Amino acid sequence: MSTPAAAPPLPIHTAIDRPHFALQFDDYHQQYDACVLGMWVFLVTEVMFFGAIFTGYAVYRMLHHDAFAMASNELDITLGTINTFVLLTSSLTMALAVRAGHVGNSKRVGQLIVLTMILGATFLGIKFFEYYHKYEDHMAPAFGLPFEAPKAVNDAGLAGPFQLFLSFYFGMTGVHALHMIIGLGLLSQFLPRSSRIAPAPGAAVLSALNIEVVGLYWHFVDLVWIFLFPMLYLIDRSDTI
Amino acid sequence: MSATLEAPAIPPATPPTRLPRNYLNAAYTVRSWLLTIDHKRIAILYLLGVTVFFCIGGAAAVLFRLELMTPEADLVESETYNKLFTLHGVMMIFFFLIPAIPAVLGNFLIPIMIGARDMAFPRINLLSWYLFMIGGAFTLFVTVAGGVDTGWTFYAPYSSTYSNTYVMATAVGIFITGFSSILTGLNFIVTVHKMRAPGMTWFRLPLFIWSHYATALIMILGTPVVAMAILLVALERGFGIGIFDPKLGGDPILFQHLFWFYSHPAVYIMVLPAMGVESELIAAFTKNRIFGYKFVAFSSLAIAILSFLVWGHHLFVSGQSIYAGMIFSMLSMLIAIPSAIKVLNWTATLRKGSITFDTPLLYALGFIGLFTLGGLTGLFLAAMGIDVHVHDTYFIVAHFHYIMVGGTVMAYLGGIHFWWPKITGRMYPEGWARLSAVLVFVGFNLTFFPQFILGYNGMPRRYHVYDPGFQVLNVMSSAGASILGIAYLFPITYLIWSLKYGPIAGPNPWNAVGLEWMTSSPPPTHNFAHTPIVDFEAYEYPSSSAAIADTHGN
Ligand SMILES: [Cu+2]
């Protein structure tokens, strides 16, 4: 909970750009520290937010082990794996963008942000393709859509818990996707602008702070997926009763 | 004594030749209020909001206390009764008790007390007020549209599947308000960490700050969990995702776990700030340093941490395993220790203090008595044997009202009176204020003490028809509630009156120490003319300098 990260990296342009900082702060460094700490505190609340549904999932996984294992087999592991790689790569480009922001290379920032956003959008595209498949297979347990569990599940009398798994799947990945969409919105502020508009003095330094904070958020959302993927797709996958 | 009743003798600090610039007269337009990012103005906005919600919640209580005068159903029918106590609970807990002290007094005082110009994130601060009001608007809509009957606890599957009332809108309202609470907590934590004036070390912080810091920890750790629980109920109602649906193998008890994981700590969101206020009041009206400063400070953190380990005491009869019950029972008793440390230290502070019985201290003493009674009956309830007997009876109702009303509301009123001269620059009428403090105390006890007996004798909560043998105690309780209701109207009236007619307070009417008393009343927009440099300890009263020298040794 104490000071997050090490000493704030000194943007090399400080002397030239004279960064602006908000009135309530004494200097730029105080603002930098406060904003970064603020994002960390926010991420703590996010951990608790996802933690609640992860806990629920873990409890039900124990209660309805067989049904959850069978339902897990219905998920498309290939697309899930591809998506994991896509998202991890976006974390890499994000990290590079943060670095570029700190050294004041705004052209580089723009390129890397575009790359990150493309990867993020790819993830969402694949995710919605997966959703669509579930909808076609009558496995979307919402809005009163037709829901049919496979015959083996029905025969074992596990249709209810099978549907519960898919509820968790849609609930958890849905909330995650919502976070991704918000992340894309946050990233869009760093998209490269027309070069004719001269940046305001200090803009580079300020955007170094913004990009650090948004970067933290982006990595967190990726990290949530790193937990979601094994929990939903991988555990007990080979189990069949 | 009687001379000071009307107008406390205040040495005029500055010759009142012209009105100095302050946060109130900086601008007068509605826009300047609704778009303000000044933490003091946001505190005033919150004050207006919570007062409105308090009055609505109070009105609901008046109605159902009237109904409970007789054992039969004569005033309202069951459905309406259920909606009334739900409205009372939702309004009072989510829209009054949780935001009251942190969002009003905390918002106003935290930056001033640590010597900052504002919160770390003033815009987020304003956003959290808007979220609070939007959440409140949803609940108001529900009230007007026809109410909700699930009780403030929203237990599934009744709330998620069966209730035909406005559960969805209420859930959305509470969900949104939850984010207001999270953002307030986030702002407090970052502000206390990063915005302290030079020389303001952690152990020079007023205990008000320590307890708000602990509160903020609970806000950011607990609120997201209840947000998820409510979101799942809403998804189940709105989209048919059946996570708590027993027909699919879902477990409604999971909802109770998630709900109480937040809602027990929420009790400490309500009480910890009250404890912070209490420390300030006791110090200022005994002119003493709080005895055992570090113990009081760390007991706030201990309460915050332990509060997350006790939620199972709400599930003793919900089919939780007996071993889990035993552990939760033990942990619930443990939390009495840090609470007792505080009460004992306040009492020790009173000893040898030069005590003046002004209104804030009357509330503070009321707090000590009522909170202690509420806390001790909490120990009864932590013991499984007794809890099974009195579960869902009026004993519980009496217990948590002693904590929440006897504790939080008393401290809130005490704090409002104490800092009123700082907030508005005017003194309130001391005589009226003392009278209403006494009335609140009497009315409160008459309302809720009989409920302990009712509950112990087996009267269940949430029923409007009861055994005629319970009538005498119920009439006493309703009579007390009327006194309490009137006693609450007094401060609302004379505080508004004092805005125009109250004597000018001056920067430090109580001769108290602390940074908030070193700036003018009302404070200027940026709180201090120059950033203060703190070279003194907390509560450095002349009489307690020896005690400070002592603690320095440790
Ligand atoms: Cu509790």
Image (cartoon, coloured by chain):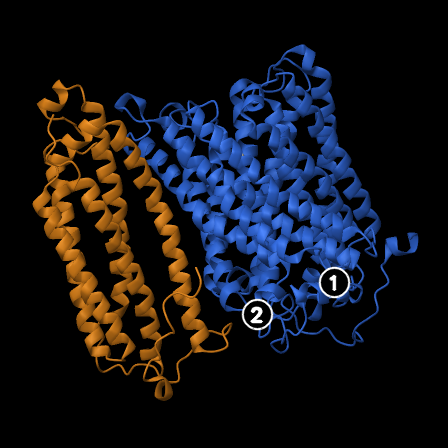
Chain colours: A orange, B blue
Residue in view at x 31 percent, y 25 percent: B245
Q: Nearer the viewer, residue B551 or B147?
A: B551
Q: Position of residue B168 (x, y in %)?
A: 39, 34
Q: Is mark 1 within 8 Å of ligand 1?
A: no
Q: Measuring 52% from the left and 47% from the top, which residue is drawn there?
A: B304
From the viewer's perspective, is residue B336 above or below residue B72?
below
Q: Secondary structure at mark 2?
A: loop
The residue wearing badge 1 is B547
Between disc 1 and disc 2, the foreground one is 1
Confirm or deny contact between disc 1 and disc 2 (CB under 8 A): no
Residue B312 location (% of width, % of height): 46, 32
Chain ID for label 1? B
Does residue B259 appear left or right of residue B29 in this picture? left
Which residue reaches farthest bottom? A16
Which residue is more in the foreground, B469 or B522?
A: B469
Judging depth in this view, the residue of B66 and B227 nearest the camera is B227
**Disc sitting over residue B207 in the figure:** none
Q: To which quarter of the image does residue B465 belong? A: top right
Q: Quick one: quadrant of the C terminus of chain B?
A: bottom right
Q: Chain of mark 2?
A: B
Q: Is residue B34 left or right of residue B548?
A: left
Residue matched to label 2: B116
Number of numbered discs visible in the structure rendering: 2
Q: Is residue B146 visible?
A: no
Residue B106 visible at all: yes
Mark 1 burial class by Cα count in 10 Å: few <14, some 14-19, many 20+ = some
Give the residue drawn at x 57%, y 33%: B88
Furthest residue to the front?
B553
